[in-house]
Image (cartoon, helix red, strand yellow):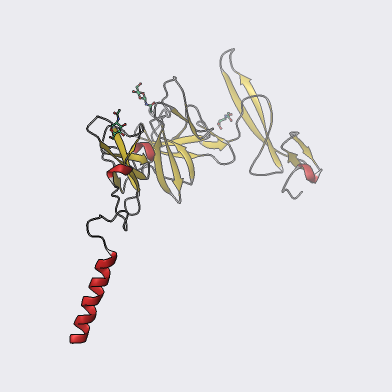
């Protein structure tokens, strides 16, 4: 008993010798304290104590008596609060609106999708979970999958009197919405770079000019697209499906039926 008390006292003295009580300990563990001499004048400091350095790290800045703001430290956010919120400068379970956000967007498949009503918003579905993003002062371009400058006003889906039907996106007809009570309820996409035909309610190859079009679902088939003029101003594109002769496939580059296997990739004649 006596021996163990002595041992303990000895260890305590040893620890004191290595431990300068007057000098604070910096950067121990997860602490963020720095000596004031280490604060750096930083023009990127906003005039607020707590802000975001990135979407996943906070930034702490302090005001000095002469009115300048100095950078203390950026603190990475980690689970279960992996996102920095700009309004508080704190880590949060929810991403900031500028940084993507889990919301009620319904994922029908993985990929990038325009929003049901806001042309500056897009959604990225991964494993059927959406993260949503807002283009700041820009419009989402679904082809470039990027935010672009645009002055045009945009109304993505016209669901008026189309409840229970699919309508193509006003700019990107590869995407379509399913309407419920005049409102776009969910957004989906045609496969094969096809576009939604609002009349047939089917995804079909784009038909914008007279000529043959590959059938991306069957290499032995193709479509012909024809512009049918009803009047000078009313033109209705018509697609008709055709099969190549037996022993042939449709060459998507030269737009002809051929028996040259190399011209029809991945197709058994
Ligand atoms: C403000 O004070 C800090 C710390 O003393 C100094 O580094 C900085 O240069 C000062 N800035 C101005 C604009 O006086
Ligand atoms: C967006 O536009 C508003 C109003 O024109 C402007 O105040 C703001 O700074 C802009 N934001 C960005 C990130 O460009
Ligand atoms: C859309 O579908 C309708 C009805 O099936 C058809 O008459 C029309 O040609 C199609 N339009 C295009 C562009 O394929």
The residue at the point 29 percent across, 47 percent down is: 35
For residue 85, say whether it is visible.
Answer: no
Return the x and y of residue 39 as percentages of the image width and height.
Answer: 31, 41
Q: In the visual, does 240 lie left or right of 262?
A: left
> Which is more toward the observer, 107 or 14?
14
Q: In the visual, does 5 lie left or right of 122?
A: left
> Which is more toward the observer, 220 or 127?
127
Image quarter where ligand 1 lies: top left
> Which is more toward the observer, 234 or 35?
35
Residue 232 to residue 184: above or below: above
Image quarter in which the N terminus is found: bottom left
For residue 147, say whether it is visible.
Answer: yes
Tally of numbered tags: 0
Residue 44 to residue 8: above or below: above
Return the x and y of residue 214 as percentages of the image width and height.
Answer: 68, 37
| Residue most extreme to the top | 232
The residue at the point 33 percent across, 40 percent down is: 52
Q: In the visual, does 57 lie left or right of 217?
A: left
Return the x and y of residue 77 as percentages of the image width and height.
Answer: 34, 49
Asked which quadrant contains residue 235, the reply is top right
| Residue most extreme to the right | 260
Return the x and y of residue 68 as percentages of the image width and height.
Answer: 28, 31
Asked which quadrant contains residue 71, the reply is top left
Residue 183 to residue 56: above or below: above
């Amino acid at each position: 008993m006596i021996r163990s008390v002595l041992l303990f006292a000895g260890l305590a003295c040893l620890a004191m010798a290595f431990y300068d009580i007057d000098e604070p300990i910096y950067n121990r563990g997860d602490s963020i304290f720095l000596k004031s001499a280490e604060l750096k004048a930083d023009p990127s400091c906003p005039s607020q104590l707590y802000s975001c350095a990135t979407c996943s790290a906070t930034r702490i800045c302090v005001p000095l008596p002469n009115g300048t703001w100095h950078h203390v430290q950026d603190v990475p956010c980690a689970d279960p609060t992996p996102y920095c919120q700009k309004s508080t400068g704190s880590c949060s379970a929810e991403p900031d609106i500028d940084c993507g956000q889990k919301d009620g967007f319904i994922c029908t498949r993985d990929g990038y999708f325009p929003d049901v009503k806001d042309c500056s918003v897009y959604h990225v579905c991964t494993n059927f979970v959406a993260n949503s993003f807002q283009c700041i002062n820009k419009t989402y371009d679904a082809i470039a999958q990027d935010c672009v400058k645009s002055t045009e006003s945009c109304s993505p889906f016209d669901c008026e009197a189309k409840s229970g039907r699919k309508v193509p996106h006003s700019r990107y007809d590869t995407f379509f919405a399913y309407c419920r009570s005049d409102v776009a309820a969910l957004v989906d996409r045609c496969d094969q770079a096809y576009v939604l035909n609002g009349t047939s309610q089917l995804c079909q190859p784009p038909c914008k000019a007279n000529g043959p079009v590959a059938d991306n679902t069957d290499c032995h088939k193709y479509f012909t697209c024809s512009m049918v003029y009803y009047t000078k101003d009313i033109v209705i594109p018509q697609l008709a499906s055709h099969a190549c002769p037996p022993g042939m496939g449709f060459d998507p580059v030269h737009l002809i039926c051929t028996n040259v296997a190399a011209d029809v990739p991945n197709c058994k004649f």
